[in-house]
Image: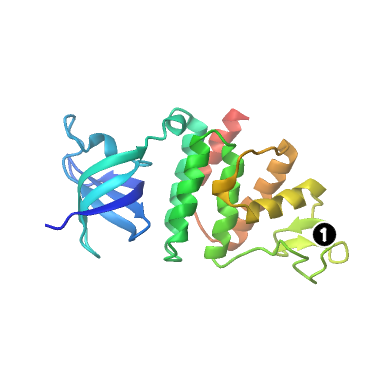
Amino acid sequence: MEITKVKGIIISESSYSETSKLLNIFTKEYGVISVISKGCKRLKSNLRSVSTKLTYAYFQINYKEGKLSNLICADVINPFNEIKKDLLKISYSSFLLELTNQVMKQTNSKDIFDLLEETLLKIEDGFDALVITNILELKYLDYLGIKPILDSCAVCGNTKILTVSTSKGGFVCPNCHTNEKIVDKKTIQVLRMLYYVDISKISKINITNTTKDEIDDFINEYYDKYAGLYLKSKKFLKNIKNVYI
C-alpha cells in the first residue's frame, strides 16, 4: 500500500456508513479528491477530530487515482480556532469552500489552492471577512470565464469612469451611462484594487461600510447574472449577515 502525503483542506463531508465519513479534500497536487475516513465517527478514533469540514492539514492517504482513497492520518497545520468560534466567520468560510468546489469543476489550475489557503488564513488572522471574501470572489471570476472589465469602460473603452454596471459587464463611463446606479467614487477605486491585490500581502484593510456594501452588491449581482451557481451556503450566509447587522 503506497502512502501519499498531501497538504489539503476538507471542503465537504458526508456520512459513508454508521462509523465512517466520505471527505472531499481539496489539494494542490490532485485537485479535489474523495477520501474515506474509516471509523472516524467512533469517539476514540484518532481520525475523529481531523475528519470535519475546514480541517487544514497534511493528510497521509492511500491514494487511488480516480477512485476512493483512504485516510491514514493527518497533521493539522492550522486549526482555524478564530474562525470556528465565530458563526459569521464560519459562514463565510463555508461559502468559500462551496464556491471553490464549484470553481474547480471549471478549471484545473493549481493557483486556486493557494488563493483559498491565503484567504482562509487572512480570515483566521482577523481581517474583515466580507472584504477578504469579496477579493476571492473577484479573482475566481477569471477562472469561471466571466471576468468583468475593471480597467476602462466596458462599452467603449473610455478610462474616465462614472460607475460600475452588472448588465454592462464592468465599469461604465459618463457617455455610456444610461440608468445604472451611480456608486461612490471610492467604490470604483477600491473595487479595482481588490481585483488586483495579492491576498498574501494584505497587511491592513480600511474601507468604509458604504464602499463595502456597494462592492458586495455588485459582486452578488454579477455572480447571479453570469455564474449560474446555486450555493446553499450563500443563502445561509445572507441570513447570518442579516442577524449580525
Position in image of residue 63 (x %, y %): 21, 58
Residue at the extreme bottom of the image, as rendered: 156
Position in image of residue 2 (x %, y %): 15, 58
Side (left or right) of 129 relative to 41: right
At x 46% / y 36%, what residue is drawn? 90
Instruction: Report if residue 85 is visible in the image.
Output: yes
Whether residue 86 is situated above or below residue 20 in the rendered picture: above
- Circle 1: residue type: Ile
Q: Nearer the viewer, residue 178 or 39?
A: 39
Number of marks in the rendered image: 1
Q: Which residue is mark 1?
A: 161
Position in image of residue 144 (x %, y %): 53, 64
Whether residue 230 is situated above or below residue 213 in the rendered picture: below
Whether residue 133 is situated above or below residue 79 in the rendered picture: below
Q: Quadrant of the C terminus?
A: top right
Q: Nearer the viewer, residue 26 or 144?
A: 26
Q: Residues within 10 Å of mark 1 (few under 14, many from 20)?
A: many
Q: How is the image coloured?
A: rainbow
* Residue 106 found in image quarter: bottom left
Position in image of residue 156 (x %, y %): 80, 72
Side (left or right) of 1 relative to 30: left
Side (left or right) of 50 relative to 45: right
Q: Quadrant of the N terminus?
A: bottom left
Disc 1 element: loop
At x 55% / y 36%, what residue is drawn? 239
Instruction: Report if residue 231 is visible in the image.
Output: no
At x 72% / y 49%, what residue is drawn? 190
Residue at the extreme right of the image, as rendered: 175
* Residue 33 found in image quarter: bottom left
